[in-house]
C-alpha cells in the first residue's frame, strides 16, 4: 500500500522550504528545497509504480515529475557556480518549463 501521508508531508516540507528560500535566495536555502524535492520525486515515482491512478492523477503526477526534473537540472547547473552557502542562488523560469502543480495536494486528497 502506498503511503500518501509521506508524499503529502514531504510536499508540504518542500513548500515550507520554498517560503524560506523566497525570503533569502541563497544556496543554503535552496538546498533545503533540494532535499525535500528528492524525497517528493522518489515518492511520486513510487506512486506510479504501486498504484492504479485515475487519468487526471496520472497526468498531474507525470507533470509534477517533469517539473521536478526541470528544477533538478537548473539546480545542478547553478550549483556548479557556488563558492559559499550564502551565495545568491536564483532560479529563472525555463522557457518551456513545466509549472509547479499548485493544486496537486487537492487532487491527492480527493
Image (spheres, grey):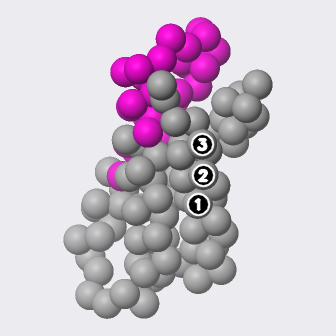
Separation of marks 2 and 1 at Cα, in angstroms: 6 Å
Which residue is disc 3 drawn over?
5
Question: From what the image shows, is residue 39 above or below residue 81?
Answer: above
CA gap between label 3 and label 1 equals 12 Å
Cβ atoms under marks 2 and 3 closer than 8 Å: yes
Q: Residue 105: x and y, percent?
A: 69, 38
Magenta range: 43-72
Q: Does the magenta stretch include residue 67?
A: yes
x, y percent for residue 81:
26, 76
Q: Which of marks 3 and 1 is in front?
A: 3
Instruction: Please provide percent x and percent y for residue 8.
Output: 61, 44
Is 1 in front, or is 41?
Answer: 1
Asked whether the viewer can see residue 19, the reply is: yes
Quarter holding residue 74: bottom left
> Left or right of 101: which side holds 98?
left
Checking the image for residue 50, the label placed there is none
Residue annotated with mark 2:
9
Residue placed at 66% from the left, 35% from the top?
Answer: 104
Which element is circle 3 on?
helix
**Does the image show residue 98?**
no
Q: Nearer the viewer, residue 70 or 9?
A: 9
Badge 3 local density, few (<14 within 10 Å), some, or many (20+)? Answer: few
| Mark 2 → mark 3, Cα distance in angstroms | 6 Å
> For the residue carrying disc 2, how many other residues have a C-alpha within 10 Å: few (<14), some (14-19), or many (20+)?
some
Q: Residue at x 45, y 34 (%)?
A: 44
Q: Secondary structure beneath disc 2? A: helix
Report the number of discs: 3
Q: Which of marks 3 and 1 is nearer the N terminus?
A: 3
2 and 1 marks in contact (CB < 8 Å): yes
Q: Mark 1 points at which residue?
A: 13
Q: Is residue 59 magenta?
A: yes
Pointers 3 and 1 in contact (C-beta within 8 Å) = no
Amino acid at each position: 500500500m502506498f503511503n500518501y501521508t509521506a508524499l503529502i508531508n514531504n510536499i508540504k516540507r518542500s513548500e515550507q522550504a520554498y517560503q524560506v528560500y523566497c525570503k533569502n535566495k541563497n544556496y543554503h536555502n535552496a538546498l533545503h528545497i533540494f532535499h525535500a524535492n528528492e524525497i517528493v520525486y522518489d515518492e511520486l515515482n513510487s506512486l506510479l509504480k504501486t498504484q492504479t491512478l485515475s487519468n487526471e492523477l496520472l497526468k498531474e503526477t507525470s507533470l509534477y515529475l517533469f517539473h521536478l526534473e526541470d528544477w533538478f537540472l537548473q539546480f545542478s547547473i547553478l550549483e556548479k557556480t557556488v563558492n559559499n552557502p550564502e551565495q545568491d542562488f536564483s532560479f529563472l523560469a525555463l522557457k518551456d518549463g513545466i509549472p509547479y502543480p499548485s493544486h496537486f495536494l487537492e487532487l491527492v486528497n480527493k
